[in-house]
Amino acid sequence: MKKRLLVLALVMLSIFSIACTKNQTARNQNQNRTTQKQAIGGVESSVFQLGDIDKIKITSDVSNIRTGCDTTSPVLQTTNKDNTHDVLSKVGDWYAVQCPGNKIGFVPSGDCKAIVSDDKKPAMPPTASGTTPQAPNAPKTPSANNTYAATSEEQQMLKLINEARAQNNVQPLKLDGPLSNVARVKSQDMIDNNYFSHNSPKYGSPFDMMKSFGINYVAAGENIAGNQTVVNAHNALMNSPGHRRNILNPDFTHIGLGIKKGGPYGNMFTQQFISKPQ
């Protein structure tokens, strides 16, 4: 009797294992079919960073500066609309600000707007000829007059981006000429130096690069992609959470687009996003 029960148990376990294997195989096949439908034959990457925020300006009629980063923390002092405060750091959705008596208070980001000084000099200021006064092999900056005319591909990408933002109730991005020149330099740099990364061997991170070209920002982001067409590149970026987040970020106000032919994927795309300082 025990042997019969043991045999029966083994048979049932075998049947269960086969059923699980078949189900897993079916799931894998479905997943593979889904992946094949979504695959667009390119490569993408994204990055985001806050700028060097010096001050905040109060936008609410009255705002409470609290001792901690939540609405239940005691009120340290109140501040009125248009008052400015020196920023020490950003903690989540709160700004840590300097208060009288060397005290530190916290202001919710919804009660204020960030201010970045526009008069900061670029780390590598361009000369009249449009080159940096660095070593002989230093990279070139955009031309002094920052002339920019969007190509038909760049105009198409901007249209797709702003349509996506409109569908998500987000204000459209304005195309920024100087930033677009930087984006073009980045795309060409990736092609010329055969790499795909946010960190350039010439210019460093995209945020270092923006600053070195004289671009100031409150927050910035970058999407890069290699793909055959604008539509495929846009769809691939929108299907990726990090890239989608940059494209639909309501805090961004301007975009720079640089599309260059070349590289292993046919075209190199650079999208650089910023929220401009007030």
Image (cartoon, helix red, strand yellow):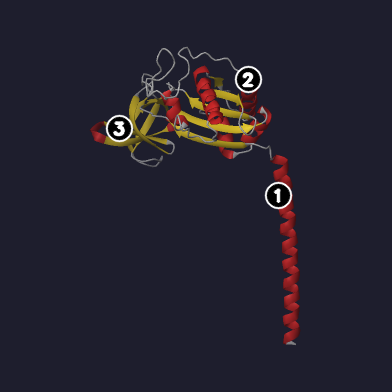
Q: Earlier in the sequence, mark 2 or mark 3?
A: 3
Residue 242 visible in this rendered orientation of the protein? yes
**Between 60 and 212, which is closer to the camera in this rendering?**
212
Q: Position of residue 273 (x, y in %)?
A: 52, 27
Q: Identify the residue position indicated by label 3 in the image.
A: 98
Q: Which quarter of the figure has residue 128? A: top left
Q: Position of residue 64 (x, y in %)?
A: 37, 33
Q: Earlier in the sequence, mark 1 or mark 2?
A: 1
Inspect the image, locate mark 1, and give the three-letter code of the amino acid beneath it.
Answer: Gln
Mark 2 neighbour class, 10 Å CA radius: few under 14, some 14 to 19, many 20 or more: some
SS of the residue under disc 2: helix
- Tag 2 and tag 3, C-beta contact below 8 Å: no
Q: Identify the residue position indicated by label 2 in the image.
A: 155
Q: Which mark is residue 31?
A: 1
Q: Left of 66 or right of it: where is 177? A: right
Q: Which quarter of the figure has residue 184? A: top right
Q: Left of 191 or right of it: where is 108? A: left
Q: Earlier in the sequence, mark 1 or mark 3?
A: 1
Estimate the spatial distance between the alpha carbons at disc 2 and disc 3, rounded to whole Å: 44 Å
Which residue is situated farthest in the bottom direction here? 1
